[in-house]
């Protein structure tokens, strides 16, 4: 399975999905840059999420809060005190590990068996607000987007005239100084969280928890993940986060094993109460109908966009032994197709002249590219034999390859090749946009 992960990492670098951050300086552990295709893919996942949970719902609104917040936020939230992992250090090679993630008490780097006693290590990244670097100006890069949804609770509720139950959604950068990294992007130090804080009446929290867990699970099916590679993990009471009454993780079967993809937590009224206490502001909700005033309970579905993307890549990577195409030039021992779901594939259409040394074909292909560009993420591709170009587009998950050949010049039609079935259909140029739109809609 490590071999499969290596192939995915290598393809991601070679084809421009994901690169090590600051690669020319040797990279930085657990920091990753998303290249041209990775950036598009991540955007597509984010947009699908926004469409499903904000655009399509009347009870959820979006905000975009800052990464740096008032330092009191992190006292109130409990992160200063409790956002820690148990850290131990190998006395021989001085490598550091999360104690709870070492399966046997042996250093994975040097095999040493002697460790320092465990201490709690806080994962918050510390920085200073303003030019004075002293205690009074310390703040932290947010480790989750959740807190600004709590600190803005009243402003959002009143400005939008929202009635409980309602949700605030946010997607944005989060930072954690993780001790254990590895497994590609799985545990990064900087990543995007997509979260909803859904405010409900106390007593109705358990039913809303079940609702959101199912909605969250369905989102991963929408991303095209296979059902059998998803499962739920119920956190035992004793290992719940300080704010949680119940937490269920959605796990994905990555090549390196089952691991947390996303989660849903019942945060009770912990956060609103704490922020009321620390700010002195009344964050209770007043129900106009019942005339009751209370702290709403919060159901929090949360996911890391990079983890979703990693699962999408692992799910999509397909090797076909012996290759699918049998023309001598194109045949490979192993052919790779990235079967990324049609809704989120980074490139929807590739436009190719059959050969690049016929100016009339190239001219026509460029005209077709111009027609398609405003409608779909399109790539113009003329380098190499047509077979090689199909292989290259399959490898990055492009849905359709449109080929301009000599018949195109006479009949104003072209071939549209489907990535998954490799079937080719001749379509009139005037019908091309509509034809692709229809195919994409069918898949939505
Ligand atoms: N607001 C709740 C919260 O942050 P969490 O379980 O700590 O909960 C939420 O994180 C999600 O963020 C996880 O389910 C996972 O998808 C993602 N995540 C957490 N740590 C991550 C990391 N170091 N790198 C990438 N994604 C991470």
Image (cartoon, rainbow, N blue to C red):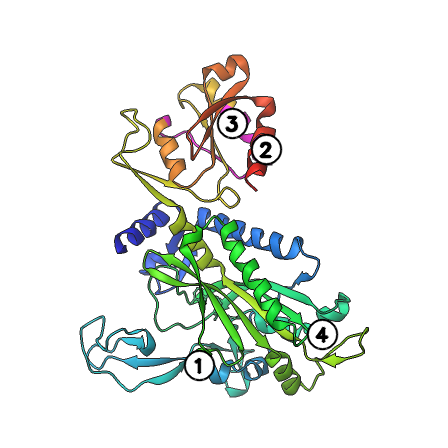
Ranked by sequence position, the earlier of labels 2 and 4 is 4
User: Where residue 135 sits: x, y (%)?
Assistant: 51, 87
Q: Quadrant of residue 111?
A: bottom left
Which of discs 1 and 2 lies nearer the camera? The answer is: 1
Residue lying at 64% horizontally and 87% vertically, measured from the top left: 277
Q: Is mark 3 on a helix, strand or loop?
A: helix
Question: Which contiguous range is marked in magenta?
Answer: 365-386
Residue at which label 2 appears: 438
Between the residue at mark 1 and the residue at mark 2, the CA separation in whole angstroms equals: 51 Å
Dot label at residue 366: 3
Q: Is mark 2 on a helix, strand or loop?
A: helix
Residue at which label 1 appears: 238
In the depicted structure, whether residue 208 falls above or below residue 372: below
| Residue 9 is at least partly visible in this image | yes
User: Where residue 25 sits: x, y (%)?
Assistant: 33, 60
Residue at which label 4 appears: 154
Residue 45 is one of the magenta-drawn residues: no
Which of discs 1 and 3 lies nearer the camera? The answer is: 1
Locate residue 141 relative to residue 256 in the image: left or right.
right
Tell me whether circle 4 and circle 3 mark residues in contact (CB < 8 Å): no
Tell me whether circle 2 and circle 3 mark residues in contact (CB < 8 Å): no
Which of discs 2 and 3 lies nearer the camera? The answer is: 2
Between the residue at mark 2 and the residue at mark 3, the CA separation in whole angstroms equals: 23 Å
Q: Quadrant of residue 29?
A: bottom left
Q: Nearer the viewer, residue 442 or 146?
A: 442
């Amino acid at each position: 399975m490590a071999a499969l992960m290596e192939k995915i990492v290598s393809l991601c670098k070679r084809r421009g999905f994901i690169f090590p951050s600051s690669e020319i300086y040797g990279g930085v552990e657990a920091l990753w840059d998303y290249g041209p295709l990775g950036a598009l893919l991540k955007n597509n996942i984010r947009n699908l999420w926004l469409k499903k949970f904000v655009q399509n719902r009347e009870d959820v609104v979006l905000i975009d809060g800052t990464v740096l917040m008032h330092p009191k936020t992190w006292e109130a939230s409990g992160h200063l005190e409790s956002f820690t992992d148990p850290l131990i250090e190998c006395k021989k090679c001085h490598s550091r590990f999360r104690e709870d993630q070492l399966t046997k008490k042996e250093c994975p780097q040097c095999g040493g068996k002697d460790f320092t006693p465990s201490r709690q290590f806080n994962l918050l990244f510390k920085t200073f607000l303003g030019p004075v670097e002293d205690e009074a100006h310390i703040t932290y890069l947010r480790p989750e987007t959740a807190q600004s949804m709590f600190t803005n609770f009243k402003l959002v509720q009143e400005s939008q005239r929202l009635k409980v139950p309602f949700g605030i959604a946010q997607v944005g950068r989060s930072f954690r100084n993780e001790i254990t990294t590895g497994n590609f992007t799985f545990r990064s130090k900087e990543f995007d969280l997509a979260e909803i804080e859904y405010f409900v009446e106390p007593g109705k929290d358990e039913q809303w928890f079940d609702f959101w867990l199912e909605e969250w699970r369905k989102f991963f099916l929408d991303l095209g993940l296979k059902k059998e590679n998803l499962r739920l993990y119920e956190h035992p009471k004793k290992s719940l986060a300080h704010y949680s009454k119940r937490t269920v993780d959605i796990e994905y079967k990555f090549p390196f094993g089952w691991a947390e993809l996303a989660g849903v937590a019942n945060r009770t009224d912990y956060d609103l109460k704490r922020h009321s206490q620390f700010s002195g502001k009344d964050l209770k909700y007043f129900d106009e109908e019942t005339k009751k005033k209370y702290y709403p309970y919060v159901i929090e579905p949360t996911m890391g966009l990079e983890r979703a993307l990693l699962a999408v890549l692992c799910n999509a990577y397909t090797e076909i032994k012996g290759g699918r195409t049998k023309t001598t030039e194109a045949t490979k021992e192993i052919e790779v197709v990235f079967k990324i779901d049609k809704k989120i594939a980074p490139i929807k259409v590739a436009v190719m002249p059959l050969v690049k040394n016929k100016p009339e074909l190239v001219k026509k292909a460029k005209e077709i590219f111009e027609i398609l560009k405003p409608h779909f993420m399109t790539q113009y591709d003329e380098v190499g034999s047509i077979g090689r170009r199909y292989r290259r587009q399959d490898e990055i998950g492009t849905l359709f390859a449109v080929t301009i050949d000599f018949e195109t010049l006479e009949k104003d039609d072209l071939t549209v090749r489907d990535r998954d079935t490799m079937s080719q259909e001749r379509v009139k140029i005037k019908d091309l946009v509509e034809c692709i739109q229809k195919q994409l809609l069918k898949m939505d």
